[in-house]
Amino acid sequence: MLKKTVLALSLLVFFALKITAQAKYPTPVESDYIAKDFVFESGEKLAELRLHCITVGTPQKDANGHIKNAVLIMHGTTGSSRSLLNDRFAGYLFAPGQLLDASKYFIVFADGIGHGKSSKPSDGLHMKFPKYTYNDMVKAQYLLVTQHLGITHLRLVMGTSMGAMHTWVWGYTYPDFMDALMPLASLPVEIAGRNRMMRQMAIDLIEMDPAWNGGEYKTQPKVGLTGAISSLIFMGSSPLQMQRSSPTRAQADAALERTAENYRSVLDANDVIYAFDASRFYNPSPYLSKITAPLLAVNSADDEVNPPELGIMEREIKKVKNGRYILLPITDKTAGHGTHSNPAVWHEYLKQLLEISEKK
């Protein structure tokens, strides 16, 4: 009898904790917007471009009926909005009393073109899908925000990795549309050097696999896709954390296979090609002086994608009128490029940005 009572109490505690975890912030709401006759930078067109989003919280309106509490958050390459809805990111930022408390803010996650549940090559067009760029992705996000959600101004625009690069593009393309900008793990210059080489190698490895078949494969081209995944693993790596988590050869081999398999289970080869190549025309550098909203760029010193020794951000941030750059030192909490999605490391800077950009 005692054992049954203890078991029952344990189950009650378990479910109570589970409910508490789920109740940290309001239930996310998913929706789609269809952009009709969307014209891409390449001149290609889609009669219907599906744009998916997830929102958390409730819009609040000012005396003129305009939404005043919207925050746009954008994800990284090959990711989706869903990848940031976890305890580490959403649970840390959106819970009651946190910086982006969802009872106060209306948070919008947008799946970029080619990602998540938005239109992408793997839906059926394969390599005939329009060759989209970051400019196209930001244009689509703007349509989603304004036409679908009815937002005319954003309290904050922020993003991780690719989403951080989109943040720069938002800043100079729609300079009066937001109060603040926070790109996390990025550089506001043309993607070149090792960064471009890693992306091109990933594309080449897929296309060199005979099983790719010009994009008309029936099953994923495993060899080529695994090669491309190698680029993803390296770009997101942290030597310190990888050594600590895999201190032996056997552990390292097992971790590599586990990580590669996780990627293979969710990635499509054509989608990966498009996602990597979408950055080909990205180059905010000539337009940074157009950014007027306060901008706080955060990078980590152990970021293999944006290594600090390049000295690029120190040079470029001077072009941003209200710009500031934070380089996080390597600590037990940083995790290379992936530090972008760990607000426990950089939340203090978000707090500062919200304070200095608050409209009195």
Image (cartoon, helix red, strand yellow):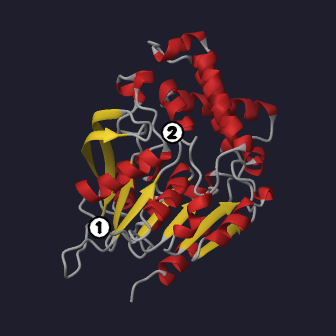
- Image spot of residue 270 (x, y percent): 49, 25
Q: Earlier in the sequence, mark 1 or mark 2?
A: 2
Asked if residue 36 lies left or right of residue 237, the reply is left
**Amino acid at the residue labelled 2:** Thr
**Amino acid at the residue labelled 1:** Thr
Identify the residue position indicated by label 1 in the image: 152
- Image spot of residue 339 (x, y percent): 63, 56
- Image spot of residue 6 (x, y percent): 39, 54
Q: Is residue 276 above or below residue 352?
A: above
- Image spot of residue 315 (x, y percent): 73, 66
The CA distance from mark 1 to mark 2 is 28 Å
Asked if residue 18 lies left or right of residue 35, the reply is right
Observer-nearest residue: 289 or 142?
289
Residue at the image point whose x is 45% and y is 14% from the top: 216
Observer-nearest residue: 87 or 153?
153
Which picture quadrant has residue 211?
A: top right
Identify the residue position indicated by label 2 in the image: 78
Residue at the image point whose x is 30% and y is 52% from the top: 144
Residue at the image point whose x is 41% and y is 76% from the top: 97
Q: Is residue 331 above or below residue 141?
A: below
Res. 325 visible in picture:
no
